[in-house]
Image (spheres, helix red, strand yellow):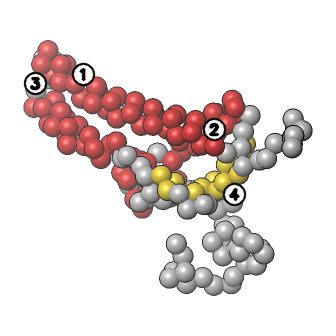
Amino acid sequence: MSRKPNSRRVESRSFDFGLKMFLTCSDGTQIESPQFLQQSLNAIKKANRQHSKKRKGSANRERTRLNLVRKHENVVNRHSDWFWKLAHDLTNQFDVLCFETLNLKRIQRLWGRKISDLAFGEFLKILEWVATWKGKEVVFIDQWYPSFKTCSTCGHVLKELDLSLRQ
């Protein structure tokens, strides 16, 4: 059986960001966040303490400042590398990627450093760029759309949903 060249099956998945798991796919697979800032936090704190103990204007202070900058750059580079690899993996697997729009500033006020470490906004920018480059599509769903309450087969929307039913 031969297929027509333009009759390609479109794979689509929806994803949900979370604090425990970075992404949860609609088919149940979960992608855990490595939390690079949390891993390097002790080294950054130590470098910051060393820097603050040095006399202003001294060569030692400049050396410890550069050491502190390197620690922060290391976190940023590891984060960015992981985001690019994840974006390429997701766009290789799926043609349409659906994400919920989030009010990241509000969430950051509630969760602080944890949300900054996850960097959802940065990931979405990278994913959009990679998807555009590969000819894939990223769709954003309104944050108030009742996706948890909507049945995936018939489309029926529940009026109330207990927390015990959510997974």
Q: Is the residue 87 above or below the residue 106 in the image?
A: above
Disc number lying in front (1 or 2): 2
Amino acid carrying mark 4 in the image: Ile
Q: Nearer the viewer, residue 36 or 32?
A: 32
Q: Residue furthest front?
A: 1
- Mark closest to the chain's N terminus, 1 or 2: 1
- Mark closest to the chain's N terminus, 1 or 3: 3
- Mark closest to the chain's N terminus, 4 or 2: 2
Residue found 74% across the figure and 34% down from its top: 135
Asked which secondary structure carries label 4, the reply is: strand
Amino acid carrying mark 2 in the image: Asn
Q: Which residue is mark 2?
A: 92
* Label 1 – label 3 distance at C-alpha: 15 Å
Q: Is residue 11 in sight in this rendering?
A: yes
Q: Is residue 51 left or right of residue 27?
A: left
Q: Which residue is mark 3?
A: 55
- Mark closest to the chain's N terminus, 3 or 4: 3
Asked which secondary structure carries label 3, the reply is: loop
Residue found 81% across the figure and 42% down from its top: 8
Mark identifier at residue 141: 4
* Label 3 – label 4 distance at C-alpha: 53 Å
Q: Which residue is mark 1?
A: 66
Asked which secondary structure carries label 2, the reply is: helix
